[in-house]
Image (cartoon, grey):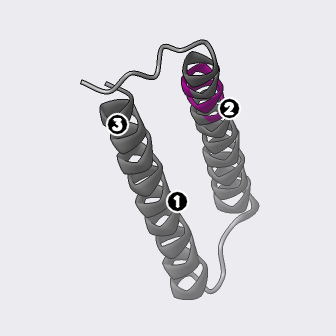
């Protein structure tokens, strides 16, 4: 059971990493493509980047919580593998 949880956490972290990388690539291409953008466009892009950053922080916090649960389960003797 613990192995499954660890596998899911690693897979989730991989997906998060791919999403972050994809977001960075999209933002980078938008920056290079647009030469003379308006202030409204720049503001919208900054808000999008900040929202992405906040969501990634929330996901990081959730992964840390799951790691804590798994580690405490192993310490309490609940780490028996199936």
80 and 27: which is toward the camera: 80
- Reading the image, the residue beneath label 1 is 20
Contact, CB < 8 Å: mark 1 with mark 3? no
Residues 6 and 17: in front is 6
Question: Any mark on residue 61, and which?
Answer: 2
Marks 2 and 3, Cα distance to the nearest angstrom? 21 Å
Q: Which residue does the image show at 62% across and 43% down from the upper left? A: 56
- Where is residue 31, by image quadrant? bottom right
Q: Which of marks 2 and 1 is in front?
A: 2
Tell me: 52 left or right of 22.
right
* Label 2 SS: helix
Determine the image quadrant of residue 27.
bottom right
Q: Is residue 10 above or below residue 30?
A: above
Q: What stretch is highlighted in magenta?
A: 64-70
Q: Which residue is drawn at 40% across and 44% down?
A: 12
Q: Element at badge 1?
A: helix
**On the image, which quarter does residue 54 sit in?**
top right
Q: How far apart are marks 1 and 3 (CA)?
A: 26 Å
Does label 2 or label 3 sit earlier along the sequence?
A: 3
Give the residue at mark 3: 3
Taking depth in this image into account, of 71 and 58 the one nearest to the observer is 71
Label 2 Cα crowd, 10 Å radius (few <14 / some 14-19 / many 20+): few
Q: How many labels does the image show?
A: 3
């Amino acid at each position: 059971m613990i192995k499954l949880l660890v596998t899911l956490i690693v897979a989730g972290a991989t997906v998060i990493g791919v999403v972050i990388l994809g977001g960075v690539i999209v933002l980078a291409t938008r920056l290079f493509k647009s030469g003379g953008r308006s202030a409204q466009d720049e503001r919208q892009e900054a808000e999008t980047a900040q929202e992405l950053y906040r969501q990634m922080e929330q996901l990081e916090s959730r992964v840390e919580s799951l790691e804590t649960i798994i580690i405490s389960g192993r310490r309490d003797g609940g780490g028996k593998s199936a």
